[in-house]
Image: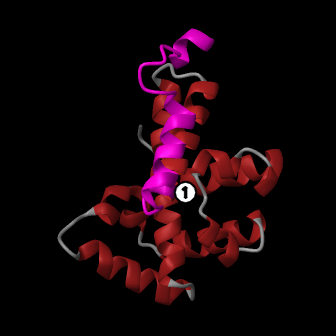
Amino acid sequence: MKMDFVDFVAMMHFLGELGGTGGCVPTMTRMSTAADRTFSGMDDRLEHYRALVGSMTPEERATPNLWFATDGTAEVRMNRVSAEAAVNHADVEQFLLDFRVMREMLGKLASGWSMDELTRKMMLARAEDEFRTAPRAGRRKLKKATRGEKGSGNKEWMEL
């Protein structure tokens, strides 16, 4: 899916109008609890995001893949933009994470996924991320709750 940072901020603004942080945006972008501590609300988040995009060069705004390079240039860009926008480095990382998740989500919706299916998969991925560092018993409990007992025959598609 072809989406640049200006499109992303406009879309986040629109989604914020649909329900803000209590609506569909946190589910769709898997906004972390760390980000919730950083931003007081959707308006605060959008203000930071607009400042970040405003600090980017036109080429950086139009070519998001520049920010995901592994050769070290992305880190230099992040440091420069965070300094120019007067935001934390973590805010830039959260912006890029939200952008990647939104782009992935919209690509899946465009390819025919239903919103329910997408939301369920994203919620499961978020739970797995949170439990990745949990003790083994917690991970097993999550696995049992989301995938059923081993050999039980209760498959998710049977419940539909």
Magenta stretch in the rendered image? 131-159
Secondary structure state at the residue bearing disc 1:
helix
Q: Is residue 13 left or right of residue 104?
A: right
Q: Horizontal placement of 69 versus 117: left or right?
A: left
Determine if the magenta segment contains residue 154.
yes
Is 144 contained in the magenta span? yes
State whether residue 4 appears in this view.
no
Q: Is residue 24 above or below residue 150?
A: below
Left or right? Give the position of 88 relative to 72.
right
Using the rendered view, name the quadrant where residue 132 is placed: bottom left
Residue shown at 69% from the left, 49% from the top: 25
Query: Residue 110 placed where, x, y %?
Result: 50, 26
Residue at 75 percent across and 63 percent down: it is 42
Query: Image height check: is 91 above or below 10?
Result: below
Q: Is residue 28 above or below residue 132?
A: above
User: Which quarter of the image is occupied by the N terminus?
Assistant: top left
- State the image coordinates of residue 10 (x, y, percent, origin top left): 64, 53
Q: Position of residue 22 (x, y in %)?
A: 81, 52
- The residue to which callout 1 is attached is 6
Q: Name which residue type carries label 1.
A: Val
Q: Between residues 64 and 62, which one lies in front from this camera angle?
A: 64
Residue 67 in the image: above or below residue 18: below
Q: How many marks?
A: 1
Q: Which corner quadrant holds the C terminus?
A: top right
Question: Is residue 25 visible in the rendered structure shown here?
Answer: yes
Q: Residue at x 45, y 52 (%)?
A: 100
Give the residue drawn at x 53%, y 44%: 142
Neighbourhood count class around disc 1 (C-alpha, 10 Å): few under 14, some 14–19, many 20 upward: some
> In the rendered view, how is the structure colored?
secondary structure
Q: Residue furthest left?
A: 71
Question: Is 128 on the left-hand or right-hand side of 48?
Answer: left
- Nearer to me, 125 or 21: 125
